[in-house]
Image (tube, grey):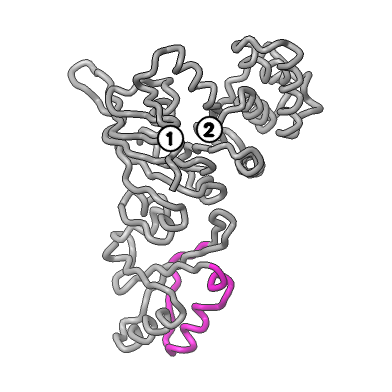
Amino acid sequence: MAEPIISIRGLEKKFQSKNSEVYALKGINLDIHQGDIFGIIGRSGAGKSTLVRCINMLERPTGGQVLFEGKDLCRLPECDLREARRSMGMIFQQFNLLMQRTAEENVCFPLELTGTPRETARKRAAELLELVGLSKRASSYPSQLSGGQKQRVAIARALATNPKVLLCDEATSALDPSTTASILALIKDINRRLGITAVVITHEMSVIEKICSHVAIIAGGKIAETGPVEEVFYHPRTEAARTMVMPEALDPERLPQGRVVRIVFTGSSSLEPVIGNMILDCGRPLSILYSDLREIDGAVCGQMVLQLPDDAEACERIYAFAASRGLELEDMKHV
């Protein structure tokens, strides 16, 4: 496997409070490979935004390494760090556009800072506004744009310096569901067409499922679990991952007495009447406590939580039926 474009080793970030030191991040280890759409998800205060700001050195880590293309950003001279930062575009939840500048002028702004000739910058801005579907709004000011259009301008601006990585810090949190879907589709299209690696920071599992290939779950300033999105969804190993994959209603302490199991459907099994066939085959009713269907990185999958009958023999037949279909029943009382 090729070397990762971003490699984080033993990263820590601590802040000094009045009477003690507080760790926002501790012992972070991550590898992000070229071409990935890598999601970092966690609840508010978990440390995810601090982590992404440490990746491009907007926040200086207090320990560890952030390697970008093999170079440790924590130890680069300031001039070399500025050059590395040009290879990392960033978009934010609140867009951060310059209100007194048009869409075109906002996209030109990072090119002005690098000394790019005006006409070259305007040509580049026109190309990028067309890429994000806003070529007709080049002369519009941010106050004349919708939230989704503002974020598209912000994406175009982040791409102005031809970055290799696009850092997205809660980029869709201020948008409605329909606009969120269009922005995520745009990020995925940019990843596919331009080969830009994307790092997506979010607190929403639906965002991760929609476009990410890999995910890291962060809790309490530490990485709780990481892996391909479908693997973390199918088989969450930690409590932090389970709270993201499964709703609060499925907390083991809230489930009814008796045997409760989770079954995951993938591929063709997600479209088959598996539960109906299971009931017919086993001759016992089942209570469905929860179900949903999701699309993970373009593939349909689902999960269902069932309460099994008290009859031990019937349960054995249900487990045998599931095994014959290549399905695994996970005991929810022992997760």
Q: Residues within 10 Å of mark 1 (few under 14, many from 20)?
A: many
Q: Which mark is residue 124?
A: none
Q: Identify the image quadrant of residue 63.
A: top left
Residue 121 x/y as whole percent: 71, 16
Which amino acid lies under the numbered mark 2 shown in the image of this protein?
Answer: Val
Q: Which residues are magenta?
A: 267-292
Viewer-side residue, 1 vs 237: 1
In the rendered structure, the answer to whether residue 318 lies left or right of residue 198 reads: left
Q: Identify the image quadrant of residue 298.
A: bottom right
Residue 53 x/y as whole percent: 43, 26
Image position of 7 with respect to 110: above or below:
below
Residue at 54% from the left image edge and 38% from the top image edge: 197
Q: Which residue is mark 2?
A: 165
Residue 164 x/y as whole percent: 55, 32
Residue at 19% from the left image edge and 21% from the top image edge: 20
Residue 120 x/y as whole percent: 73, 16
> In which quadrant will I find the C terminus?
bottom left
**Labels 2 & 1 near each other (Cβ < 8 A):** yes
Q: Residues within 10 Å of mark 2 (few under 14, many from 20)?
A: many
Is residue 281 rendered magenta in the image? yes
Residue at 67% from the left image edge and 31% from the top image edge: 152
In the rendered structure, the answer to whether residue 312 lies left or right of residue 37 reads: left
Image position of 13 with respect to 39: above or below:
above
Viewer-side residue, 76 vs 50: 76
Is residue 162 rendered magenta in the image? no
Q: CA distance from mark 2 to mark 1?
A: 9 Å
> Taking the image as drawn, is residue 33 in sight?
yes
Q: Which residue is mark 1?
A: 6
Q: Secondary structure at mark 1?
A: strand
Viewer-side residue, 60 vs 146: 60
Residue at 43% from the left image edge and 83% from the top image edge: 324
